[in-house]
Image (cartoon, rainbow, N blue to C red):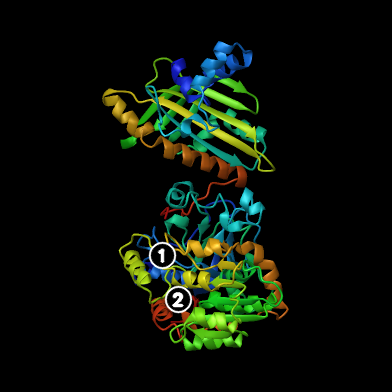
Amino acid sequence: MRAVAWHGTHDMRVDTVPDPEIINPKDAVIKVTSTAICGSDLHLYDGVIPGMMPGDIVGHEMMGEVVETGPESTLQKGQRVVVPFTISCGDCYFCRKTQYSACDNTNPADKQDMSEKLYGHAMSALFGYSHMTGGYSGGQAEYARIPFSNVGPIVIPDGLEDDQVLFLSDILPTGWMGAENAEIEEGDIVAVWGCGPVGLFAVQSARLMGAGRVIAIDHHPHRLELAKQQGAEVIDFRRTDVRDALMDMTGGIGPDAVIDAVGMEAHGFAVDNVLDSVKQTVGIGADRAAALKQAILSVRKGGRVSMPGVYGGMVDKFPLGAFMEKGLTLKTGQTHVQRYLKPLLEKIQEGEIDTTWLISHRLPLEQAPTGYENFRNNQNEWTKVVLKPGMSA
Amino acid sequence: MDDDTRKKLWIGLPAIGAVAAAAAIGGSAALRNARRDRPHDSAPGWTTHSDRFGKYDVVGRAVTINRPRHELYAFWKDFQNLPTVMQNVTSIQPTGKDGRAVWTISAPGGRSVEVETEIVKDEADSLIAWRSVEGSDIDTEGRVEFEDAVGDRGTKVQLVIAYKAPGGEIGRLLAKAFLKEPKIQARHDLKRFKMLMETGEIATSAHSRTTGE
């Protein structure tokens, strides 16, 4: 089959590789019909995620048709499913607490050492996202092996198009959990850093959760426009001092909750951000956290910080004093996708949530390298790329 | 293994119970001795900064498995099950003599090493301890303990293995085969044990059977 493989920094290729097969009893194999490039795939593209090997098949936002099932899979051939990017066993202590992304059992034993050393605990497995999170082949391919298929995939009823439900795989639940972690109360003012897909869905989710005002921060005019369409006021950080603006827009109080939907490769003009960028480039693990720092200084006293943005290493000059003195709360984590699939699918079915407006480009799988390049370099226009393996090149 | 080494380990190996027994019996002298040998914290002996106890290297690891004690004990009790989760053990064959078994361990260059063990302690649903018999190539002792975990978390499983690295040419080969990264080996083995018991399968990121990639 054909699949998108990582070959190094800014080097994604479409390779011919062996077809996936059923290996464990709970496995299924799907024929991929839609698979998206995620903002976090850009961290792979930029070479800042450790544990990648040339030839690794990438992609963790996928859906398709079940074509093979193992003896213990609960899926049936012919079903259409959306697959969560988190691989979870459903049986361990964490899965039973619905903390699916903390699953103990899906990351193969010999792949757990790296995260155990780096983070103190081994991480669960994710599709197509380095050997630190299992080394599983991803979904930007014609076919994908789905381990623990009885826990993850959600069956999509007839009448819903791929484009309506694909984002259940990651960015919709991630934006939703980002808003949930902000513990929004009716009438709250919520500020969201980053109008990428997750930030935009966090804006949408925050409104649905009762936020009185949502203020979105980015520098791409088109992305700010999309945020406005979802009911946000917007700040362009290239022309405006964000903290000053937020303070005055909130009458000197500061937002009740802030959401960092940017993560480890934040843009920033401060000296420390430039230094961190250099450290990141030479691989000594400094995450650039300009957005998070700004969010912590802007949020009101006693406010909440939610961090759906991805970080992988250390942060220098974290404003810990501000964090403690202001009495803030931080909630974060990889998304517990399985927890949100059913309720969010229902909201899509009822027309309460639509996510199709995000998609700017639909490309055949063969054009994945073009998709990566533009999603990274032309962020204003390329807001979301969906690859369609069935589309002729 | 001498008693002194066992005392330093405090918890884990078969004869260690002697110290606790002495303490339990009373007698102030025995208590004092026990206290002297006992660390002043509650941590398992193998988590000290040193992993050498006399001539022995010791590795230990605890894991919580969301299954009842008797199920885990039953799996472990049948040594022939263990190669499923122990990556470097090819087979464990009972020899028919009171709990004795021969472990075949894969070594570099397609070779293999054999160690014969005997069961020294077996308490239903609680613990199994074994040690190599006199004249074995590797002097080793192991112990696995099962206790109810707090709350509804299932069972806490503790594995401790002590071994003395042999000398000479054969020693170097054995060290490579069996003793090279025992800490990592024990960690991986317990994780595979947990996966199998909790989910019924051992996670693999293999993509295809034929290429294994």
Question: In this rendering, do the residues under marks 2 and 1 share a single chain?
Answer: yes
Question: Which disc, if any, is residue B117?
Answer: none
Image coordinates of residue A102 in percent, x first then y, are 57, 55
Tell me what residue is drawn at x 62 percent, y 16 percent: B24
Badge 1 crowding class, 10 Å Cα cut-off, few under 14, some 14 to 19, many 20 or more, is many
Image quadrant assignment for residue B112: top left
Disc 2 sits on a residue from what chain? A
Q: Are marks 2 and 1 in contact (CB under 8 Å)?
A: no
Question: Which disc, if any, is residue A287?
Answer: 1
Disc 1 sits on a residue from what chain? A
Q: Give the residue pinned by disc 2.
A: A365
* Label total for image: 2
Using the image, determine if residue A238 lies above or below residue A14.
below
Amino acid under label 2? Leu
First of labels 2, 1 by sequence position: 1
Image coordinates of residue B126 in percent, x first then y, are 63, 28
Using the image, determine if residue B139 lies above or below residue A123.
above
Residue lying farthest left? B169
Foreground residue among B211 and B185: B185
Image coordinates of residue A117 in percent, x first then y, are 43, 48
Foreground residue among A380 and A169: A380
Of circles 2 and 1, which is in front? 1
Quadrant containing the N terminus of chain B is: top left
Q: CA distance from mark 2 to mark 1?
A: 31 Å
| For residue B92, side relative to residue A153 (left or right) | left
Badge 2 crowding class, 10 Å Cα cut-off, few under 14, some 14 to 19, many 20 or more, is many
